[in-house]
Image: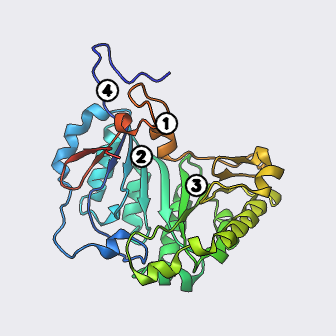
Amino acid sequence: MTKYYDMNGVLKLPQMIEIDPVETCNLRCRMCHVSFMATEKRPVFDIALLPRLKALKGAFVSVASGFEPTMYRDFDRLMRGLTDLGVQMQIITNGTLLDRAKINTLLASNMDIINFSFDGIRKETFEHIRRGADYEETLENMLSTREAFRGRDTAFLVNSTTMRCNLEESVEILDFWERHDFDVVRFLPMVVRYSDQDLVRESLYPIRDRVKQVFDMAALHVIENNLKAVMLMPYLYSSEVRRRFPRNCSGLYVYADNPKSRRVLSLRERFQLGEHPLMRFYDCRAAFTTATILANGDVQLCYK
């Protein structure tokens, strides 16, 4: 069992850190919180703080969770500095700013997971959702990154926020990323966080029966076509596919019998879910194993 205390009974340092070096993004995606943020000056991470993180050697660092990290002016120094600290890394990025220099920075970094956010797969759908992004340029950046890492063990994931406007593209999405050798396609349900009529119209809740039909079809597509790509479904629900193929379904994951399939666990599954001696009412240890470093340098522990 994992030990959470040292010999003196003191709580250990976090096993996983999230760092948001900026609090902004170059896009204004329809469903994203950034599109609804007030226009004001935002803090930027002070790169001089990086040497103070030496005690985190051996931890896992997720670069970005809610904003676009490649907008950070010291992106190269941040990534190389974290690598020098001996941490493993995940980056979450929209891919629009990944030029050759930034790809080289990623190649020189200790990348465990590269997680792209790309909604839908048709040009008109993508550019409708991701306001400010160019479909062709973004795909070129992402696929160039994937090719640059050919032969490495780094996992490549895609987050696809599912809305009404891209729901019917789900099988197309799987096939596209399968062709380009991505490991996991994570379908994430859009959350209506604001009383915005455009968001309300995109809500999946009123068509939830159709949502289940579409994702059952997608799950069956993965299994019957022996895809390498693993699918993360947006909901855990009673499904005929799960009953027929129990060995191909685990939690939200659906995967074929393809020996090249990689079920890459999310950081939440790796570090936050599970028992902890001080958490007696919920199977979560996030408050004791993870922390977030905000752009202003503050350290935020889980308070949820």
Disc 2 residue type? Met
How far is the residue under mark 2 from the one under mark 1? Answer: 25 Å
Q: Residue furthest top?
A: 7
Left or right, 216 with reference to 289: right
Assess disc 4: are there few (<14), some (14-19) or many (≥20) residues with their C-alpha within 10 Å of its C-alpha.
few
Q: Secondary structure at mark 2?
A: strand
Residue at 17% in and 73% down:
40
How far is the residue under mark 4 from the one under mark 3? Answer: 36 Å
Between marks 2 and 3 in the image, the one whose residue lies nearer the viewer: 2
Disc 3 residue type? Arg
Q: Mark 4–mark 2 contact, CB under 8 Å?
A: no
N-terminal of the pair, mark 1 or mark 3, is 3
Q: Secondary structure at mark 1?
A: loop
Q: Which residue is mark 3?
A: 150
Q: Which residue is mark 1?
A: 283
Disc 1 residue type? Asp
Q: Which residue is mark 4?
A: 12
